Amino acid sequence: MGLARAKALVVAGLILVVLLSAAATSLVEQPDVQVFFSRVDDPQAAIIHVLDGASKTLHIAVYYFTDPELAAAVVRAQQRGVQTYVYLDRSQVKHKHSQARYLAAQDVPVRISSNRAIMHNKFAIVDSTIVVTGSYNWSRAAYQRNDENVLVIRRLDVATRYKQRFAGFWTKEFDLAATQAVRGN
């Protein structure tokens, strides 16, 4: 093997190492699943980061929504032109710190669950490809005091399943009178 060919192979090998390193770095920065624990990590910041990255759609189904910073992120998405939908438990109609009325006043479509027990889901689907879920209620207590967890899942198959369930909530399982009460109708 000639010296020129050996040098070319070394250069090609170095280029391959650089490309593989860049690919590995991007995988570490954007894994399929990220896990955040309250009081150790910052789940609220993780949720806000994902919401702020929404560019097309945002579907949210949460039991308890009293965190004004998360509500502000939802409103920012709506104001950027992101099609935004929020589905909440019926407790949010009268709860003193509920963000339901604020969201509705900002023209965010809000619907209230018709479940007579509780709608205990806690998830968001962003751009039909990312799911944010876990035990984390979208509340100040979850942010400040509780032990909670958030998963950010970047998998189309998972997002599709969540979106199917959200569609059932949104189209068939909402209480019209409670929804109108939140809107002030």
Image (cartoon, rainbow, N blue to C red):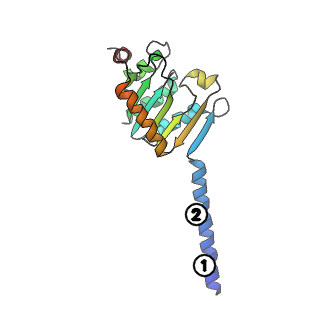
Mark 1 and mark 2 in contact? Answer it, CB < 8 Å. Answer: no
Position of residue 43 relative to residue 102, above or below, is: below
Mark 1–mark 2 Cα distance, whole angstroms, equals 16 Å
Q: Foreground: 45 or 119? A: 119
Q: Is residue 122 left or right of residue 177?
A: right
Q: Is residue 141 left or right of residue 184?
A: right
The reply to whether residue 106 is in sight is: no
Q: Residue at x 64, y 30 (%)?
A: 38
Q: Position of residue 21 (x, y in %)?
A: 62, 60
Q: Which residue is mark 1?
A: 8
Q: Residue at x 57, y 28 (%)?
A: 136
The reply to whether residue 92 is in sight is: yes
Q: Position of residue 164 (x, y in %)?
A: 41, 36
The amino acid type of the residue labelled 2 equals: Leu
Q: Is residue 162 left or right of residue 185?
A: right
Q: Position of residue 159 (x, y in %)?
A: 46, 40
Q: Which residue is mark 2?
A: 19
